[in-house]
Amino acid sequence: MVIQRSFFRIMGSLFFLSLGLSCEVNNDGGISDSIYAKKVYPLLGTNHSRWFFFSSASRPFGMVNLSPDTEIDGAWESGYKYDSDTVKGFSHIHAWQLAGPSIMPINPDLIDKRSMFHDYYSSFNHQTEQVFPGYHQLFLDRYQIKAELTSTKRVGFHRYTSDGKIALLFNLNGQLGPSFMNNGIIKAQEPTLITGQVTNLPTFRRPKPCTVYFAAQFNSPIEDIERDPSTGNYVVYFENQLSKPLKVKLAISYTSVENAEINMKEELSGWEFYRVVNESVHEWDAVLSRIEIEGGTEEEQQRFYTDLWHALQGRRIISDVNGAYPDNFGDEFRIGQLPLNDKGEPLFNHYNSDSFWGAQWTLNTLWGLVYPEMMDEFVQSLMQYYRDGGLIPRGPSGGNYTYVMTGASSNPFIISAIQKGIVKDDLENIYQALRKNQMPGGIMEKIGYEHNTNIGGGLLYYMEKGYVPYPLSDVIYGSHQDGASQTLEYAYQDWALAQLAKKMNKTDDFRYFLGRSYNYKNLFDSISGWMRPKNKEGQWKADFDPYQYENGFIEANGAQNTWFVPHDIEGLSQLMGGDEAVSFLLNQSFVEAEKLGFTAGSSHQRERHPEFVRIPINYGNQPSIQTAFIFNYLGKPWLTQYWSRRVVEEVYEDLSPDQGYNGDEDQGMMGSLAVLMKMGLFSMKGGCSLEPILELGSPVFDRITIQLNPRYYSGEKLVIEVRNNSDQNRYIQSAQWNGKALQNWYVLHNDIVKGGTLILNMGKAPNEQWATK
């Protein structure tokens, strides 16, 4: 395994260099002044892609995520997959359960018009491809067309160059990623303008249709538009096109054609393609430069900024520049309006998002420290869903709930933002929305994609019996009906809400939810030594195997999920025989997991493979990604330092299309985790404590500088200086915070955001005396 991973690291570096990913664009598009975006390797892990995983011609959180599609059938292994050498179109939306208009440039002289609408794909070669944040360029062999892509937040910008003719095939009907597209139409409005729309039909996960409206403008007059009656798709032909590159601006909106045109007018009025490329790269540079790193290898720095780039991906804007947004909760579709400031600008953007399941260990901490403005904006967006639909969502899509995953996973995200002082206003209304989510009638009652009932969450059993039974019933109401995991998740979320209740002097609620947070104890089996599912009658699951995947646990096994008690490690330790016994068991689990590289295979789909499924700790998925930092709480911080560094080395250091996150990246989740672990920072309780803390691990880099946002924090920057750092010197010998000796394995969030310097003195051997009291 080690040899194989080292091979991928070497090949990844060579591959990176061979593609010339240096952010150099010819003609007027030189962007050699880029410092951070040019370190990003967008092709990471793309052999195990999924519809919303890959990004190239996109802005941070942009509504448009324009990129080539080499696979278009389904949500998994779709979008841009590196090992597929055929382009099937350039589509504008790669979002959670949503796709959008796809364009394929063709040469009408080089294609059989009788089969043009069924046979229009083209091969391409990676050797002539260039990809970096904000830009994608490749060469379509079949048509001899050079394709270049960039974008603003809501407008895709295409540039096609060829010695021959260029026409555009609009694919508006049929399967496109997770959606079946239907009712796609185009209308000519002006000599160089068309408008149209296409509908994402309902899916198992997204219960209602979602229409995407668009306006496309060209730099050449339209000669003709041909529609194919069998596919419903269109080809647009152009006049006077041979003497110049064909440029296309395509703006989208989820509300109306008129708003798509407004989006284009406000964001992209001109035709300077390379200027837009430069603006996009510089925008990425601005957000990536919030964290500056020194030390480590060039490859380690490239992977770090690739991880950070992923942390700002996937969750995408769905509101227009004027604040209009889709509200799909009622019987009839409604166009909502976000609140505006004195200048008529929206106070925040509205977002489409996969679940926040696992965000307590990832986005909560990274965004809360480095991007508090994004955390604030997402809280406002989640509350807008509450005002429209009555619940804070776990993962909304198309202006509606999808009920993805389980529990009230967005609640700790919001609570963390309040505890850190990021969100300060309207706290009573926010609290009542959070409370509703965790009571009957709230989202905690529903399991994944349970649209029409509210039984699968097992909340009433949890409240009455102190656990969610497994099996709950013979009826399957949705997905992830696994009572043991649900119980553990609900207990943590109850603890988090109890902390906010205490902050707001809601004594009765504090006591109530804190009492529920101990429900995890009802599933600990002292005979087996693991968390174990119980049925309705209170009987332990027969033939229990802690290494059996799922069967009471969500995307995990019992050995992994036993550690899901982040709010009460002390109580868990007492159940399991004390700190020494727990440390021994957890350390042995890491030793065993190391043999498989700490992940269950190379992708999320392989987690059920018999060879990988029995791993005791899996850093390719969310349920056990906190485990390395449990040692801090057991009085052995040196084991946190050792194992957190080992996980980084094995899981989050490759640079190749084959090796990425070896699991389920989930819209920035694992990218955020990788960034945090490489900085040696973590938050076991997800930042939901009355006084949030940041726990220390073993930083990879010699110096880390975090620029703090002055709108939210009084400090200018946080510096982490790691002295005598190396691959061997991974253990903290001593530490100082702002010149004073630090004897704890954590620092207070409220101290860190005032700015200062954390010095970590590293050594080759563990210092078993530091921070153990």
Image (tube, grey):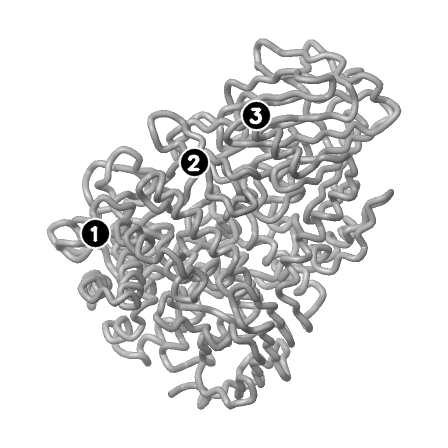
Crowd rating for badge 3 (residues with CA inside 10 Å; few <14, some 14–19, many 20+): some
Residue located at (56% from left, 43% from top): 49
Disc 2 and disc 3: Cα gap in Å?
17 Å
Query: Which of pointers 2 and 1 lies earlier in the amino acid sequence?
Result: 2
Question: Could you tell me the amino acid type at mark 1?
Answer: Val
Instruction: Tell which residue pokes out farthest to the left in this image.
Output: 537
- Which circle marks residue 468 in the picture? 1
Which of disc 3 and disc 1 is earlier in sequence?
Answer: 3
480 relative to 666 in the view: left or right: left
> Any mark on residue 257, and which?
3
Q: Residue at x 55, y 19 (%)?
A: 184
Element type at mark 2? loop
Residue at left offset 68%, top offset 60%: 302
Quadrant showing the N terminus: bottom right
Q: x, y percentage for residue 332? A: 37, 25
Pointer 2 with pointer 1, Cβ within 8 A: no
Residue type at tag 2: Gly
Q: Give the percent coordinates (x, y) of residue 370.
A: 55, 63
Per the image, the residue denoted by label 2 is: 399
Answer with left or right where residue 464 lies relative to residue 517.
left
